[in-house]
Image (cartoon, grey):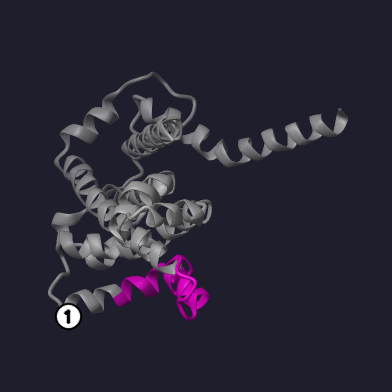
Amino acid sequence: MPMKLAKTAFAALTILFLVAPLIAILPLAFTSSVILTYPVPSWSLRWFEELFTADAWRRAIVNSLIIGTGTTLLATVLGTAASLGLRNRLLFFRGSMRTLFLLPMVVPAVVLGVGMQVLLAGFGLTNSYAGVIIAHTVVAVPFVVVSVTGALAGIDERVELAAQSLGASPATVFRRVTLPLAMPGVLSGAVLAFATSLDEVVLTLFVAGPNQRTLARQMFSSIRENISPAIAAAAFLFIAATVVIGLVVVLSRSMLAKRR
């Protein structure tokens, strides 16, 4: 019993350690003051109103949604396809190829940003939505690969072999058997890709132009110019959107599990 209480206390302290910065900053999104300070003089929604009325913040939110959606779709398709390919046991150097897919997770963002800028400039894609989406996809694909690979590892291959023995074509097996079983991993990978795109600022600084300023880049610029409570309001929106998307994924996975 004492050991169980100690483990519970340790878990609670770990969670508190992780969320303490959020607990400290999020209430300041509702302050009426023009500076980030405690105690809060009075409560107000003025900074949320600024996010949706100021041209710079409103444009940044729209750009983040456009780029995040494009990144999610592209990264999910490429990451799922890569995971399916890496599943083939006959593939030579499968472990090495999996490592190559995960490299963007460990390469310094500045190095990756310089490389993406040089590469996209050669195709004339710098300062464009397509260029930013491609750059964000590079760092989002590894998260999809990890998530989908884990889901595929949990699929009993005998189920797919049974479908093939009944005359199903490879496309039918993928559409009716493999994809539904791997869908929880695909959904989780899509959420991670969207969150990665929303949070990415270094690559955006290198490849985006003034018209592709995202919310993360706007927050970064605002911190350099003036630490405004609007940054806390934007962070609140980030976290709220992530929680909502996470709940949607959990509910979707639960519904898929019940259907199976």
In depth, the one of 45 and 12 nearer the eye is: 12
> Residue at label 1?
122
Q: How many marks?
A: 1
Q: Residues within 10 Å of mark 1 (few under 14, many from 20)?
A: few
Between 35 and 209, the residue placed more toward the observer is 209
Look at the magenta stretch and give its main secondary structure: helix
Question: Image point 15% across, 65% down: which residue?
Answer: 127
Give the x, y percent position of residue 135. 28, 65
Question: Which of the two residues, 1 or 38, is positioned nearer the viewer here?
Answer: 1
> Is 79 situated above or below 65?
below
Q: Is residue 221 left or right of residue 56?
A: right
Q: Which residue occupies the extreme front position in the image? A: 166
Give the residue displayed 40% in from the left and 30% down from the top. 255
Residue 71 in percent (x, y) is at: 27, 55
Q: Is residue 37 visible?
A: yes
Numbered range of the magenta stretch: 87-115
Which residue is found at the position 38% from the left and 75% from the top? Answer: 111
Q: Amino acid at mark 1?
A: Gly
Would you say 184 lies left or right of 66 here? right
Q: Residue 105's x, y, as percent?
A: 45, 65
192 in magenta: no
Quarter of image, res 201:
bottom left
Q: Any magenta on residue 94? A: yes
Q: Secondary structure at mark 1?
A: helix
Which quadrant is home to the C terminus? top left
Q: Can residue 224 be seen by looking at this rendering?
A: no
